Image: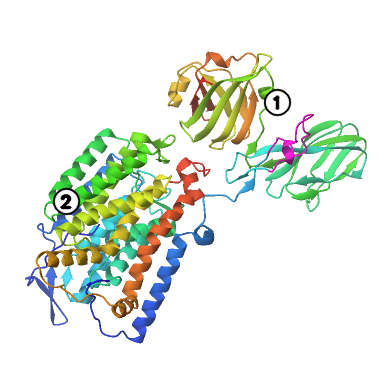
Amino acid sequence: MADISLPNPPAPGLFHRAASGLGLLVLLASALFGGNVAGMRERFLGSETPEERPAAVSRGTEVAAPPGETSPATEAPKQSVLRSQPWWQSVGKIQGTGSMTAPAFSVNADAVQWRVRWTCQTGQLVVRAPEQRRPVVDAACPGTDTGYGIQKGNVSLQVTADGPWEMQVDQQVDVPLFEPPLPAMTAPGARPVMTGSLYRIDQVGTGTVTVYRLADGSHAVRLDDFFVTANTDLELQFSPLEAPRSTKQVTDNPRSPSIATLDVTTGSLNFPVPSHVDPTQYRSFVIWCEVANSAYSAATLRPA
Amino acid sequence: MTAPAVTAPARPKPHVTLRGQEIPVVLPSRRDPRFKLSSVVITLHVLGQTLLDWKVSIAQILITMLLCGVIEFVVTFRGQRIIAWPASGILTGSSVALILRASGTRHGDWWSLRGIQWFILAGLISLLAKHLIRPTGKHLFNPSNIGIVWCLLVIGPNHVFAQYLWWGPSHVGQALAYAVIIGGAMWILRAVRMIPMAVSFLVTFAVLTGIFALAGHSFIAIWHVGDIRGLEYWANLAFSPEVLVFVFFMISDPQTAPKPPLGRVIYGAATATVAAALIYFQTTEFGIKVAILSSLTVVCAVVPFIEAWCRRRQAAASGDRQPTAPATPKSILAALRRPAVIAALIVAVAAPIDTMALANNKQVVLIERGEVGKANAQ
């Protein structure tokens, strides 16, 4: 404070002192708020960042590990704030004959909803879920269809049936899916042949794309640490362009047939390439939305 | 971004009579340096609305200017009993709207009031700081700077952001913007003797960010595909029109910059050094912009010390005695009990700490990567 002259104002009154003290408290509070201490700012003013949740490690919650390998489902899942387009994860299959209380299945607390894809042989099938007025299924047999519910945790269905029935239970989740590489990708004789990093065109796309040549001569694509703006009806394709930068560039050139439809829009995923598509004939990888006629994202493929 | 100094007329001639009392009227003058600065800022706003796709609406700009103008008018009238054209307030408002953006505002929504509360808050904070935090008898912080920094840090990246470092997409628009900024700088800075300060900032900043670029630093930005690194990192920082506006039209405010020429050079270099030190931790464009703006908040707080050092140095060189008595522990303690000094201290300490906290903020990274689920939160 060396030789800085400060003015000498008259002694402030009680009101001024109280107002100054209050002002300083507000300033101090805003300083703490601005530092997002203990997540204060995001708690009060909202956040674009969803809560961290454990990502899924497989397309089913009941996946069995391949012989000699650790079950991916038993590994600690990654925590992620990213959200995928909601996708269906298999929960399990329940079956029986006649009326009964079906074995309970477990639905994640953060699942959007669950469904049963049912089949029955004779008579009538009525399936009721707890605390749900309308039955999940109320149909004549033989038949097959889908019923939906929104209960979380352990769900036990009450089945009224005249014959054998079967239900495949799935839950809809929006967490990323981090699948391990396909065993065929790491098997002897398999090798990565092309790789590239996703970049945005009409929407955001990040992550890496690797094309594998498998031991049997077929190909598979792996997306690692991948994210694309969520939407339904996204397809994976190859393009002959080296680095498409717009939807028009993509549509002005012939593309490969769709390799797969993208149900999960973030995570690490594997896709077998259909036998009639030869990835080595193309130079880039495109995430395409047929409904919107829009190239979401692309990656230039270079030899791995 | 307030204003180059203005010399108030000794005896304003026009006046109005209110309840029998003659009240002087100070009208706007073309010789007022603030007029020049306002012209440059308004020209940039016009370019922003027409060629540069700025995500700020005309309504947001006008309301912020009007609010700041009215507050300044009332404060001046109450304090000095004059009716004065609120040039400083209007300039503060237009400067806030030049840099601050409300998330979700789209270019071309001319009359959108989206996030208008954040503009109003930034304007209010600017003028509150100007009129209340006066430890040396004059305002310490650059008003629009502290208002914008407060808003960016306290309201946060979910709701507000600063104008992009890169002003696209039109090349013509960019060329015109550079012409206006550099032409405006020559027009204004020469008059207020701030060219050495600007040069000292730009050289120091270019060297330090160049070292960062060579060391492999990078950042992500919502408008860019992939990381920005290397030469692109350096060019986007050292030659960003946003940074040039900051140097030429914000830190050059003679009211908050040191008066001695050497002090101004130190001030420019110190601001660049603090900016670079804060940028060092940032990996997002949002963090980098807040770092640059916060650097001025920090350095403004030490301007009285820079001036005091210059005075001592000058006194020593001319063989004079110390111009004022040296500080004693008692005088320091007495100063630290003053609300304005405490407030200045809180601001000067909180601004860099809160800025550094942005480096670990996942939300900023998600927003800049466009991974928040919305197409573009900014």
Same chain, labels 2 and 1: no
The image's colouring method is: rainbow
Q: Amino acid at mark 1?
A: Pro
SS at circle 1? helix
- Give the residues drawn in magenta, as a range: A57-76
Which residue is disc 1 drawn over? A183
Residue A35 in picture, x, y percent from top left: 46, 59
For the residues bearing labels 2 and 1, Cβ distance under 8 angstroms: no
- Looking at the picture, tell me which residue is in the foreground, B112 or B272: B272
Q: Position of residue B226 (x, y in %)?
A: 44, 35
| Quarter placement of the N terminus of chain B | bottom left
A74 to the left or right of B26: right
Q: Image check: B212 left or right of B80?
A: right
Residue A190 visible in the picture: yes
User: Which chain is indicated by disc 2?
Assistant: B
Q: Residue at x 51, y 41 (%)?
A: B371
Asked if A19 appears above or below B89 in the picture, the reply is below
Q: Nearer the viewer, residue B89 or A130?
A: B89
The image shows residue A263 at horizontal and vertical percentages of 63, 33
Q: CA distance from mark 2 to mark 1?
A: 66 Å
Look at label 2 and name its amino acid. Answer: Pro
Whether B178 is drawn above or below A40: the answer is above
The picture quadrant where one finds residue A142 is top right
Q: What is the chain letter for disc 1?
A: A
Residue B196 tag number: 2
Q: Position of residue A231 (x, y in %)?
A: 57, 36
Nearer to me, B201 or B34: B201
Task: Tell me the residue at 35%/72% (across/down).
Answer: B342
Q: Is residue B219 left or right of residue B255?
A: right
* Circle 1 Cα neighbour tier, 10 Å, few/some/many (<14 / 14–19 / ≥20): few
